[in-house]
Image (cartoon, rainbow, N blue to C red):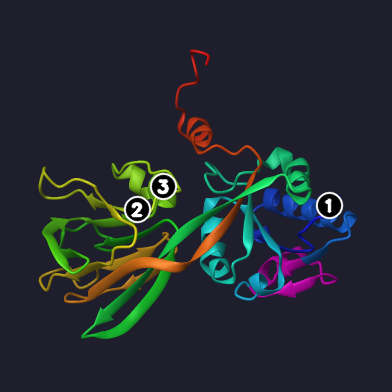
Amino acid sequence: MISQFRNIGLIGRVDSSAAVEESVRTLVHLLEQRALTVILEEETSRALGRHSLQVATRKLIGEVCDMVIVVGGDGSLLGAARDLARHDVPVLGINRGKLGFLTDIASGAVESGVSKVLDGHYEIESRFLLETELKRGGAPVGQSDALNDVVLHSGQAPKMLSFELYIEGEFVYSQRSDGLIVSTPTGSTAYSLSGGGPIMHPRLNAIVLVPMFPHALSSRPLVIDGNSEIKIIIGDNNPESPRVSCDGQVNMGAQPGDVLYIRKKSRKLKLIHPEGHVFYQTCRDKLGWGAQLIGD
């Protein structure tokens, strides 16, 4: 069967794990056997030492590929997603990490799983990202995207923060807490879940705001419309080193009085799942939910 994917990009932190390197080499061999064009991400190529293959930077690989395969844990896919979403290229994850909510194909099924996708047995799901902008005195001082979450926190030492929250220009509350998690449905099974937030189905157009150890028993997670603009004003009496973290990978230093804007990004990530993928099955597998006891 001729695959609709002809130019395949590969991203993997080969230098971080022998298991990742093994999977990347397996993929290169599989794709070359199918006479497909393999394009290695620049750092992956450098670590792998395959100088005979085409190479592209992380920011450009999405322009020249029909599909990009990311090998690693969810963190690897999160990092790639922020660059790949803008190119509208579908992304497939190979799990060489721990939970693997985003990286569907298990390490022991690399060849069979990827072969099925190349043969057309797959599903594509769109996931929205958040874009965030930090302003100081009305001027932008930092910006980034996030597939999972944007987190305002006090920095390395746990300290209480004070801030004001606005949604669609309307004042919601002022709060003292260790911070605030602003999560997409994709991120609802990550840091937000650890903070007591709800699990949201990936198809929901919603954002959840989860206070971190709030200084009020009545402060609870809040689910809002996914198209809402969120504004957070950092109080003037805060420590001088609050931080804004995107997916736990991009960190921006904030100051008292700064204003943080968070909204849905217009471009979405196209995530490839093996055929028959069911979100609730993933939850059962990854979160240890009980198996079915009664038949249909």
Image height of 218 relative to 143, above or below: above
53 in the magenta segment? yes
Instruction: Name the residue type under label 1.
Output: Leu
Which mark, by number, is residue 206? 2
Which residue is denoted by mark 1 in the rendering? 30
* Left or right, 70 with reference to 247: right
Mark-to-mark CA distance, 3 and 1: 32 Å
The tag earlier along the polypeptide, 2 or 3, is: 3
Which of discs 2 and 1 lies nearer the camera? The answer is 2
Tell me which corner region of the image, top left, top right, bottom left or bottom right, holds residue 162.
Answer: bottom left
Is residue 280 placed above or below 120 in the rendered structure? above
Are circles 3 and 1 on residues that touch, CB within 8 Å?
A: no
* Mark positioned earlier in the residue sequence (2 or 1): 1
The numbered dot on residue 190 is: 3
Q: Mark 2 near mark 1, Cβ–Cβ under 8 Å?
A: no
What x and y, as percent, mark residue 173?
Answer: 11, 59
Q: Residue at x 34, y 43 (%)?
A: 194
- The amino acid type, in three-letter code, at marker 3 is Ala
Q: Position of residue 151 (x, y in %)?
A: 32, 60
Relative vertical location of residue 107 with respect to residue 261 in this rendering, above or below: above
**Residue at disc 1, secondary structure:** helix
Which region is colored magenta?
39-57
- The residues tagged by marks 2 and 1 sit, at their Cα atoms, a distance apart of 39 Å
Q: Nearer the viewer, residue 22 or 168?
A: 168
Q: Is residue 211 left or right of residue 1?
A: left
Residue 105, numbered label: none
Specify which label sits upstream in the sequence, 3 or 1.
1
